[in-house]
Amino acid sequence: MHAANASTTPARRSARLGPATAGLLLAPLLLALAAALPAAATQADAPTAVIEVRQADLDADHWIAQLPEPDRLILDRAGIAAQNSRMRAQDKSIHDLAALPDPAPRAFVREQVQALSAPPTRALFDVQGKPVPKKTLDALQQAIALDAIPETQPLRYGLVVHRAALRTFPTSLRVFSSAGETDIDRFQESALFPGDAVAVLHRSADGQWLFVASERYVAWIEAAHVAVGDRDTVLGYARRTPYVVVTGATVRTTYTPEEPRVSALQLDMGVRLPLRADWPPMQAVNGQHPYASHVVDLPVRNADGSLALAPALIARSADVSDDYLPLTPANLLRQSFKFLGERYGWGHSYDARDCSGFVSEIYRSFGLLVPRNTRDQAVSPALDRIAFEPTDSRERRMAAVRALQVGDLVYIPGHVMMAIGHQRGLAFMIHDTNGGSWRGADGQRVRAGLNGVSVTPLEPMLFGDTETYVDRITSIQRIRPRATP
């Protein structure tokens, strides 16, 4: 045999193999593939530690595959705009900053402050589990400085410069309902995000906190987190085009030592930021060439507290979009599962979110406005509500459960869940919960302490020792087209 024949390529050698020889070579491969398929199926069907939840149930694609029309448009852009207009007109928890009284009368400001910052009526405990002294709580009433509110005062407007807590009182003191429980801070109300507009209604006695109204909340925020500017710039910021929308659970701006004020800022789902479309393509942004990034305008706070706008970069690889996402069942599932496993954060603590923040931020990525708190979401007249009374029968409740559609919001006292589909005779939810319990095989209550964004069935979940979540449903809210009167 010549050397040339000895070096015949594998492709040529295989071409000369007969059918029997080729079959012998392929047989092990086919056997391996056949063995792998049941293993994969078994893994997907493997149970988790949560009742009725299997491994496959933790994947958005599993639920999308069950939808007959996953890309059906629930509301188009015009429908979302109409829904938002209805929300602003009908829901009292939504505030139109442009329509606030200006100048603000003392009675108006005082009423807003007192509605939130009323003296606590129950015992509270600090992080060490010790009772919070009465003198500490009394001092908070002095800090809100009600007597310092003038007869009238011109409104000031500002933009939030980075994710910041909204508080019941002008304090960072964390307080809890019981000793040893340090997750749910009773002075934590919510959070605002970079670019959120506020109207400044009042200032704390020490000047370190501002009492502000935002579109969805009125509360105290540290003054260091707000840059005060002229009304048109502040209220016009959210209307500027072009823009990008954060579609990931969270995204961060690019790190920059040159401009720390816009470096590695957390941006949460649904945050909308204007683009600097006029940025010169060869001009660096904070020491970095911009061609692989989006150049956005972010609010920053000058030393005197005034507002300025600074360019910042968001990498093109980041989970952002040049517009709000289409509101479809498949996209609702994809967006909700981006939070799966995130730690529960009462009132947006821990740079995370709670149950109502979770669902409102999912819908915000579609450009849709939803009230901040569960109590307001559950009764909002601007949504398509199915209401339940304590006396309603189990049959009526179960009929509504069987009719749930992807994206429907299910409310029980103090909690909201989003429907993701049905299987094995159960309705399944995704929700951000600090609890979670059900009956074990022995009939005893299993307390899971899920404490994060979780997938669970609805029907087995317990509300207390005897009632189920289904027994305690107060309402179901659905977002869908509304008939024209």
Image (cartoon, helix red, strand yellow):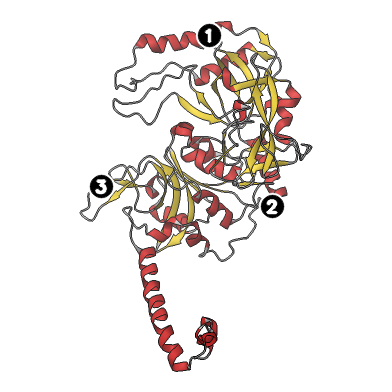
Which of the numbered marks, if any, corresponds to residue 76? 2
User: Does residue 37 lie above or below 337 as drawn?
Assistant: below
* Residue 155, quarter of the rendered image: top right
The amino acid sitting under disc 2 is Asp
Q: In this view, does 386 lie to the left or right of 312?
A: left
Which of 482/261 is in front? Answer: 261
Q: Position of residue 182 (x, y in %)?
A: 35, 28
Circles 1, 2 touching at the beta carbon (< 8 Å): no
Callout 2: helix, strand or loop?
A: loop
The amino acid sitting under disc 1 is Asp
How crowded pointer 2 is (Cα within 10 Å; few <14, some 14-19, many 20+) is rated as some
Q: Position of residue 132 (x, y in %)?
A: 34, 16
The residue mark sitting in front, 1 or 3, is 1
Sequence-earlier tag: 1 or 3:
1
* Residue 162, quarter of the rendered image: top right
The residues bearing labels 1 and 2 have C-alpha atoms spaced at a distance of: 48 Å
Residue 231 appears in the picture as rendered: yes
Residue 484 appears in the picture as rendered: no
The residues bearing labels 3 and 2 have C-alpha atoms spaced at a distance of: 44 Å
How crowded pointer 1 is (Cα within 10 Å; few <14, some 14-19, many 20+) is rated as few
Residue annotated with mark 3: 445
Callout 3: helix, strand or loop?
A: strand
Looking at the image, which residue is at 64% across and 15% down? 303
Residue annotated with mark 1: 206
Circles 3, 2 touching at the beta carbon (< 8 Å): no
User: Does residue 9 lie above or below 461 as drawn?
Assistant: below
Which of the numbered marks, if any, corresponds to residue 315? none
User: Does residue 198 lie above or below 465 as drawn?
Assistant: above
User: Does residue 356 lie above or below 308 as drawn?
Assistant: below
Q: Is residue 394 left or right of residue 15?
A: left
The amino acid sitting under disc 3 is Arg
